[in-house]
Amino acid sequence: MHAHTSHHGNERATRILRFSLVVTLAYIVLLVIAGIRSHSLALLSEAGHNLSDFFALLLSLIAVYLQSRPPSATKTYGYHRAGVLAALANAASLVAVSFLIFYEAFKRLQNPQQVHAEVMIGVAAAGVVMNGVIAVLLYRTGRDVNLRSAFLHEIGDTLSTAAVIVGGWAILATGKNWIDSALSFGIGALILWSGFGIVRETLNILLEGTPRGIKLERIREIEGVNDVHDLHVWNLGSEPRALSCHISIADIPPSASERILRDVRGCLHTEFRIDHTTIQFEHAVCEVAHGCVIPVTEQH
């Protein structure tokens, strides 16, 4: 059942990403043409932002394909981290695009140009609709970090194109063309903020850091568990989590320890969504218990 659901989710994500790629590419062409004709740096900034979105969506599509591949003798965990790598590349591209926008906006402030606000407003309105629809589709498709990075790209575009509409009205009302450059700075800041968030999350996964919100003191409360040490928790990909640990129990028959194991696994599944576990029981003093290991009493 789980494999079938995952396969169905991958197919749906693939369809949505393909549709998003085609629509985004068409809108990039429109932005470039309109930006050149209206002399609007904000529209050209949006073209750059959407170009990064196009590659983000393409990377996400490739990652969805790789993640659907089964484990093998050489990739025993499968390809879960393909999506994480795609998200990191997407986030890095966001950061690069934001600094390019800052540079161009600074140059435009020094040499202002006449901006055709009516064209800005019309093209940006189309962008709000397009990016908003894609963002909603991505949000409803899945919440792993790969799709979420693409979703953040689209949310950023939706908000920034909405800001272009407001800026266009402001230029029409005041005649101040520097508003176009100011909008570009705002768009760049928004892109930078969203990019850094994804970079931080993906690096934590790649460095096998403890997943956010994990506090495993609960294990010690399970009946029969005396101590937990040599504890390691990490993400296999965006969603799947794994755990390995040593658990000290009394010198009891295997049939009795089986009940403790079921309780521990049930707790990990229901409270922390951890299903891939390697748990070693012991009743003697563990030779690594006081070494370079992580006890469960640490705050995770």
Image: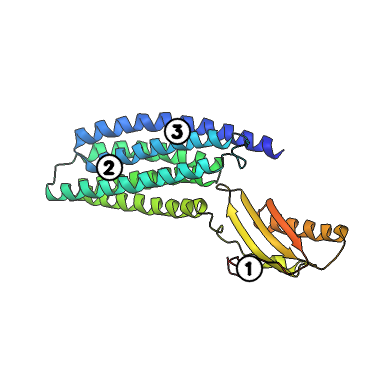
Up-down: is 230 above or below 99? below
Res. 157 visible in picture: yes
Q: Are marks 3 and 1 in contact (CB under 8 Å)?
A: no
- Residue placed under numbered mark 1 in the picture: 295
- Whole-Å distance between the Cαs marked 3 and 1? 46 Å
Q: Earlier in the sequence, mark 2 or mark 3?
A: 3
In x, y percent, where is residue 152? 44, 47
Up-down: is 240 above or below 48? below
- Residue placed under numbered mark 3 in the picture: 20
Q: Are marks 2 and 3 in contact (CB under 8 Å)?
A: no
Q: Earlier in the sequence, mark 1 or mark 2?
A: 2
Compare residues 153 and 55 and report the one nearer the observer. Answer: 55
Q: Are marks 1 and 2 in contact (CB under 8 Å)?
A: no
Secondary structure category for the residue under label 2? helix
Q: Label 1 amino acid?
A: Pro
Up-down: is 42 above or below 228? above
- Residue placed under numbered mark 2 in the picture: 45
Q: How many marks?
A: 3
Q: Residue furthest front?
A: 287
- Whole-Å distance between the Cαs marked 2 and 3? 19 Å
Q: Nearer the viewer, mark 3 or mark 1?
A: 1
Q: Label 3 amino acid?
A: Ser
